[in-house]
Image (cartoon, rainbow, N blue to C red):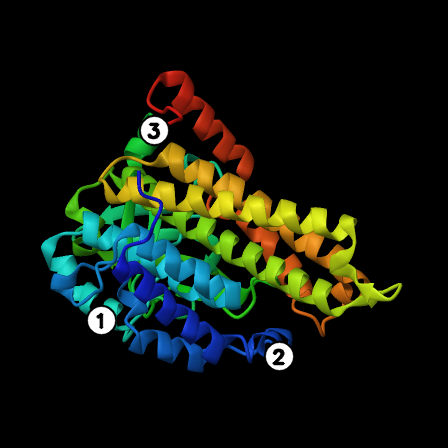
Amino acid sequence: MDFELTGEQKAFRETLRAFVEKEILPVATEWEHSGRYPAEIIDKMKQMGLFGLSVPEEYGGMGADMVSFALVFEEIARGWMGVAGTIGSHSLACWMIARHGTEEQRRLHLEDLASGARRTAIALTEPGAGTDLQGIRTRAVRDGDHYVVTGTKTWITNARHADPLPVLVKTSIAEPAHKGMSVLLVDPSSPGFSVSRDLPKLGYKGTETCEVVLDEVRVPVSCLLGGVEGRGMQQVLGGLELGRINIAARAVGVAQAAYDAALAYAKERTAFGQPIAEFQAIQLKLADLATEIQAARLLTYWAASRADGGERVDMEAGMAKYFTSEVALKASLESMRIHGGYGYSQEFVVERLYRDAPLMAIGEGTNDIQRLVIARALVSGKGRIGW
């Protein structure tokens, strides 16, 4: 039983930490409050190869193991969670193309996506269908050598930069519904495709989150992911396991940042003639946070290492995402309480962390859904706890 990162993973983490300390932390609060897009940071992430995290080496990517994948999102989210979003859905979509795409699709897209010359995202959610993906209404009707796609997608991160944009559609009215679902790699320059608006958000700023309208968009049949209809739900669910490890790691990063801020402030702030870190009430909060954050980190790495072993990790990823996001929520609130009135001020980082944390409890499937996924795996015998 080994709880240590490999030497290569440790070196990678140190590189990431140095990048975050130098390029992200000094500007995150100012840029987030002003609504500035982090273009310079994204350019440096391209140079580091981070847009190729989930792209195999043969297509120019990093082909990172899943623990290293988690390290990226933990460290970047520690600096600015919104920046982590620019490679989150991108990495998920790249994984889907690499895993399920035809060889032609891989050759056409992956090299540019790995370098960041082009970026991508994934369009699943609709105004009337989020958790229940089988309830989507976006239709793709075959017309010769094209599909004609009509529908609306919402909460799409990276939508203004995605090329191509993988879109979950219904290619047939089949029962059960998942058998009629497919993924199309849509060219955003196609007539009828538009990004209708950016959605205003409480937190998770720095990257755009949009509504996308497809009005009779003609998509070549060659853009059907994998070349076979009816496999869309299977392709997406596999990708969402990766997505939940991504979200879990981001939550660890946000929680760590909240704890770091609370500890530093508690050592500096004095009351009644001594640092508030000397008061037992504050010490108990810090002890709870440190323990829960380390548990969250280990749970995330455990899920990632299981994924590296080639196993299905829907239960493990669900556990990690559920637990870590709840820890992030608690950590951001407790850090604000330790800061007192200053925690409510935009001059301190904790207010941004407090706004960012709720996304992890909602994104990639709500925590109630994660609990159901976990419970069903346990009841069915497909999942177990322990080693």
- On residue 387, the disc is 3
**Image quadrant of residue 111?**
bottom left
Provide the secondary structure element on which disc 1 rests.
helix
Please report whichever mark, 1 or 2, sits nearer to the chain's N-terminal start. Answer: 2
Q: Nearer the viewer, residue 238 or 81?
A: 81
- Of badges 1 and 3, the one in the foreground is 3
- On residue 112, the disc is 1
Residue 163 seen in render: no
**Image quadrant of residue 353?**
bottom right
The residue shown at (11%, 58%) is 104
- On residue 355, the disc is none
Q: Is residue 205 left or right of residue 347?
A: left
Q: Of all residues shown, which one is farthest toward the right? A: 272
Mark 2 lies on residue = 30
- For the residue carrying disc 2, how many other residues have a C-alpha within 10 Å: few (<14), some (14-19), or many (20+)? few
Residue 313 is situated, as x and y percent measured from the top left of the image, at 33, 36
Q: Nearer the viewer, residue 154 or 217?
A: 154
Q: Is residue 87 left or right of residue 105?
A: right
What separation in Å lies between label 1 and label 3 (alpha carbons)?
Answer: 40 Å
Provide the secondary structure element on which disc 2 rests.
helix
